[in-house]
Amino acid sequence: MNKKQTTNWFEYPIKVQPHHTDYAGVVWHGNYITWLEEARIEHLRYLGMEYTDLVALGCDLAVIELSLKYHKPIYLGMSALLKARLAAIEKVRLNWDYRLESLDGNELYLTAQVTLVPVDREKGKIMRRLPTLLQEVLEKLILSDGDIKQE
């Protein structure tokens, strides 16, 4: 898989397989959420942080808000590009934006927003601070992309 960081967006290619679709050959809605998470994890890996390292520190990134807007259906056999970016950091809230587009960028299939927070795996509570490893990775991203808002 070819993944890269563009000026604002990390690009994650999607190929619609039979197990992604319903009986009509249309992508089942739950697969979009899986793809969002895959793109986010690959983006963090690209920046130098393996998700397993975060888990080893006793931290999970829990989804606390999710919004999807379906613009056009995507079908069996199609390829598309899922673009992901960290849009804002609000204390410990990480707000991500997504766009699922045709490879040529002419068709928009889905837009989404996801908000995550770090959760202490042992205590099951939201952490008051981002883990140092995650903070360092996100700081690299912030320095390379002036569009990310920090509050």
Image: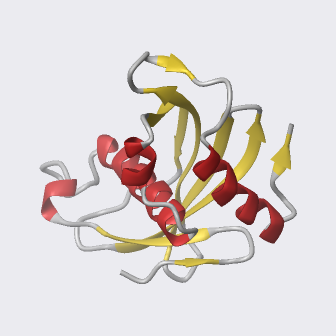
Q: Quadrant of the N terminus?
A: bottom left
- Residue in view at x 77 percent, y 34 percent: 90
Of 136 and 5, nearer the camera is: 136
Residue closest to the eye, 142 or 33: 142
Tell me where residue 58 appears, x and y as whole percent.
Answer: 42, 34
For the rendered model, the colour scheme is: secondary structure
Q: Quadrant of residue 25?
A: bottom left
Split into 4 quadrants, where in the image is the C terminus? top right
Q: Position of residue 138 (x, y in %)?
A: 68, 55
Q: Name the residue rendered at 24%, 73% in the picture.
A: 77
**64 shown above or below 108:** above
Q: From the viewer's perspective, is residue 141 above or below residue 87?
A: below
**9 lies above or below 84:** below
Q: Is residue 91 left or right of residue 105?
A: right
Q: Which x, y percent locates residue 102?
A: 49, 73
Q: Is residue 137 above or below residue 67?
A: below
Front residue (pair 73, 39): 39
Residue 76 image offset from top left, x and y in percent = 23, 66
11 sits to left or right of 139: left
Residue at (47%, 66%) from the top-left corner? Answer: 45
Name the quadrant containing residue 38: bottom left
Q: What residue do we see at 29% from left, 63% from top?
A: 75
State left or right for residue 26 relative to residue 140: left
**Disc count in the image?**
0
